[in-house]
Structure formats: C-alpha cells, structure tokens
Amino acid sequence: MASTLSILATFTIIRSTFNDLFPKEIRDYFWRLFRRFSSEFTLVIEETHDGSSNHIFKAAMEYLGSHLLSVSSAEGSPKRLTVGKSENVRKFTFGLDTHSEMLDSFHGVPLKWKYNADVNTTNNNQHTSESRWYELSFQKTHAEMVKSKYIPHVIDMAKRLKDRNRLVKFHTIRRERWSSNAVKLDHPMTFDTLALDGDLKNTIMEDLDSFINGKEYYKKIGKVWKRGYLLHGPPGTGKSSLIAAMANHLNFDIYSMNLSAVNSDSALEYLLLHVSNRSILVIEDIDCTIKLQNREAGEQTVNYPHGQVTLSGLLNAIDGLLSCCGDERIIVFTTNYKDKIDHALLRAGRMDKHICLSYCTVSTFKQLAANYLGISNHELFSRIEKIVEQINVSPADVAGELMKSKDPKTCLEGLIQFLESKASETASEPKRPEGEGGNNTKQEKGCKSKGSTKTEMTNSDSPNHNAITFLAVGSDSMPVGEYTVKAELAPILKALLLKHGNIVANCSLKSLQCRSSLLEIACGIIQKLQSVTLEDLSEPELESMLASVSDLESLKLQVSWLHKRLDEITKALRLVKHSSTLEEEKRKNLQEIKDMEKELESFQMETPEKQKKSLQIQEMKPVVEILSQRISSNEANLSCFYQRSLVDGLL
C-alpha cells in the first residue's frame, strides 16, 4: 500500500513539475507532435455545423444512449451517466457525462467515443454559451470504413431508436386544420390482445413488417412509400381496435379525418400535405361520411351549398402527385358496406389490401375468453361454440358479456343466455329477399361462413370413386351471385368468393350449372372440415378430399389454398398417429422399468445380476426422456389444430 502511494505521489510531482517548466503552447506542441506519429485518428463531432444543428451529433447522442447500460458492466465502461425523460418519449434516455468515454465495436473494429463540454465566457467571466462535442477515435486504417459504413449505421440506428421510443399521438381536425394540440394515444390494444383469427392476424402483421422494411424496395420500383388498407365488415367487428393495434405495432401517429368536416378539395390537399411521416391516416365510414359519386352505379353529381370533397379530389389526394410529399404513410379506410364504394377507390395503389373483419368465430371467442377471463378451456365452451357457429354476433357484443363478471362460470352462463336470446330473435325474424328493406343483406351477414349443418360426404377407400360429378339444381338450392348451390352451402360460398375471388373464372367448363357443381364440391369439403376435429378424420377421408381437389385443379379451379390446407391436415394426422406409437412405446418402457425396479428390491445383497439390471434401468431412462421430448414436440406442432377449427383462415 505504501509503495503504491509513493508511486502516485512521484507521478503527481513529475506532472506538476512538467506543467510548471513548460508553458501551455509548448505542451500543446508536444501533443500535436505525438499525434502526428500516432496511428490513432479522431473525428470531432460538434453540436453545430455551419451555423445550424449537426444531425450527426444528435444521432450519436441517441445511439450511444441506447448502448450505455448494455456496456456498463464491461471493463473500461463509464462510471458516470446522465439520465432523463421528456414527455414525448416512452423510456428513460441515458448519456455520457462530461469527459467520459466508452468503447463500441463495429465489424470487429474497436471505436472509442468521448463526450466533451466547455463553457464559453467573456472577458468579464460571464457565462455566454456552452459548446458540446463528441470525439470518435479509431485506427487510421479504418477511416474509410468509419466514413462509409459506421457513421451511416449510427444515423440509421439512431432514427430507429428514436422512432421506437417516441409516444404515439392522435390528431384531429379543427376548422379544416389539424389541431395544434395532439393528444397522447394511450390505447392498450396490441396484436397480442387483439381477438382476430390467427391466420388473418399473422398476415396483417407480416404485411406491416414488410412495408416498414421496404424503403429500398419502393425506391427500386419507383413507387411512393405508402400503403392503403380497407377494413370492411359489420359494426362491432374490431375495425377501430385493429387500427390501434397497427399504430402500437409500428409506433405511428394516427390522423383521424372526417371527410364531412372538409369543405373543399383544396382543404383536403392542405390537410394531407401536413400529415407527418410515420403516420396512419384514418378515413372512417368512407361510404357514408360524404356523398361520393359512384360512377358505376350511374349516380348523378350532387351539388352542395357549402362545398364538398369530390371523388376526383379524393383520388388525386391519395394517389396523385400530392401523395409523393411524404414517406412511411399508411392510409386506412373503413366501411360497413364495401359494395357502396366506387371501384376507382378500391384498386391497388389506393386500397392495396382489403381486410374483411367478420362476425365472431370460435377462434375469436376463445381469444376473447383468454383475454377477459384468463381461461383457455371450460366445460361450457362446447355449448357456446355451437351457438356462435349458428348465428351472427359481433366480437364487441361477446366482449361486452365477458366483462360483466370476473367469475368464469357466471360470465359464460350469462353469455350463453345472451347468445340463445339472440338466436331466438334471429329465428323469429321473417326472411327477406336480398336487398329488400333498404339494407345490404350481404354485409349484414358479414364475411364469416357458418357451416352449422353437419353433412355426410360420400367417401371410398379408392380415390377412383371420387371423380367429379355434376349435380342437378334442386328445390333446396339458393343463388349466390351468378351461381346456384345447395342452401346449406350458400354461406360458405359467399365467404369463399369474398376471400378468394371467383375461383372458377379460368375453369375449362363454361356453363354456369357445371361451374356451380364444382363450387358445391369445394364448399362441401370446407363444410366437412368445419364440422369435425382432427381426431374425427381418417386418412381415407383425407385422400378422398385431396382427390376431389386435384380433379378441381385439373379443371383450372384456383383451389391451391384448399390443397395446401389438406396437405397440412394430412401431415398433422400422421403426427397424431406417430405420437400414439411413441406413447405406447413410452408406456411399455416405463412398465419394464417399474418391473425391474421391483426385482431389484428382492435382492438382499449386491450381485452381478443386480448390477446388470441397475445398468439396464439407467440406460432405459434416457430413452423414455427422448420419447417424452418427441411427444411434446409433436403436441406443440399439433396445438394449432387442437385450439381452432380446421378451416380457420380459409374463409
């Protein structure tokens, strides 16, 4: 200890003597001479550059702030940090204290950062301003890499971190201008808690992620970096919740526009010019907020006394030259009646992706039950699922019932009463022809197919018996568009056409009757899958369905999506069979181990035979463990088939 103090004291005396003997000018000269022969190079990044704010300085502050805590335990890391939080960010922000240093690494190259600050004073020792700068030091041989790769990396990462940390704001219109006082959007809805069919949810998330990472792609193909979504379906099916989940997923601001509050095309242009980047522009109820002329419907232009946004004005605003003034923008239109919207608005480039939000399905109900009650299964689930498949009920109505009690049984019993009363009301309502009564019946039924009637399909062990046959139209038939199918298959066909379009458009058979028969076959397969679980299916049944689908494809029907699902179900069924074999093998091994352990208890002393059996037991236990792991792996792969209908996501 004494020797250490002696060395420190000697060093202090030498430094003091050096500073006393040599003036500052000479000391600075020595340092410049030392740096000239040094292999280290330093970039000085000041807070201002050419009289304005230095973008690289701000990026460095954001970038280093995100790395400080992760390196705080490393050797040579800074011991003093600054911390703060403003109202416009989600998390704390950290920074280097004055004259502190930290090490970073990029592509295996060490880089040293140092933060400096100095107060500028006048001759009267009055404080005038503060100068702040970063010093970035590295070996001279890496200068080109730092300039061309590392600094752009710092700027890009800083932008991502800043975008991720900022609060989402909600903007509304006041007197044809965006309100200056945007409110913080503190909506708790995320894709984790959003009750939506799993396949549709994943499709939307993948599409959003593809868009947000597609800057170079959009630039390459010469298109504006924006995307349009149309959310359509009955009221209460989660359109607003989906928008909130999208905003939280992307961390985008929301601009809510009511077109009835905009009195002219020029006012609309002004508003769109002042929508920030990384934002979602929401135009709700596009079919009824204003009277846009539907040209295909032959409607006449309506004159309004106080002006009105026109269809051409809206088209030019969202897809004309005006749309080029901004990046990373999403436009979301919502409607309850898709068929009332002019086709010019529906095309790609304006509404790129059409998302149908349907009435409550079994899958949606289970997600709601998990969110609101914290349960994934209950003895009352089967009753609820049967009713949900029979009637049209919105997820909002189901959620409202699930909020009435925290006790799962009480809550589910109340939901059953609500659903049964709704089913009675539906049954007592007189059936009206489509379009009668001023309502769009197609939209009232939603996008969901209700395969409630369990029908038998003719199956045979030989695929040759499943050749396509054409069915005569009977008295129980119902028209769906230009096609006519069995009444029980009509809801499925409506949902099929809505989801996948006209799958018989390229069919080699031209008559409507033949095409209707082919559609009946496809709908019959879907109806069968709706009415059974994975365990109810047999391999001959699946082979029969696959043979029918192959025949449909040979006639140029677009049913590859159905073929893919049947292939997935076939693989799942084989997994079930494999798991059953593994379970039996595991059971036999466990029984054998148990028997041998009983034999060991009968031995009074250590013998070669006892040692042999003990060794056998030790060798068999890892085998049982491996079998258990394989069974668990199979169960994990099969979980999606156990937790939802076999047709979830198909319609």
Image: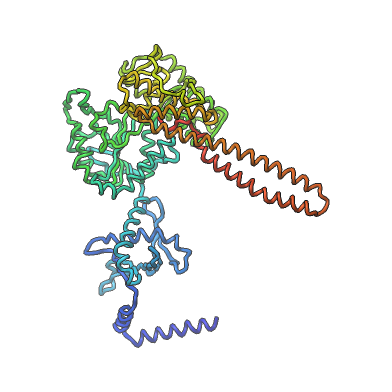
Q: Nearer the viewer, residue 139 or 629?
A: 629
Location of residue 27 in the rendering, given as x and y in whole percent from the top left corner: 32, 82
The quarter of the displayed image where residue 295 is located: top left
What coloring was used for the rendering?
Answer: rainbow
**Can the viewer see residue 125 in this picture?**
yes
Location of residue 100 in the rendering, given as x and y in whole percent from the top left corner: 39, 68
Tell me if 416 is positioned left or right of 108 in this view: right
Residue, far right:
604
Going 36% across and 68% down the picture, which residue do you hit?
114
State whether residue 11 is above or below residue 214: below
| Placement of the N terminus among the 4 image quadrants | bottom right
Residue, far top:
475
Tell me if 416 is positioned left or right of 90 in this view: right
Location of residue 449 in the rendering, given as x and y in whole percent from the top left corner: 41, 25
Residue, far bottom:
21
State whether residue 492 is above or below residue 85: above
State whether residue 481 is above or below residue 29: above
State whether residue 138 is above or below residue 552: below
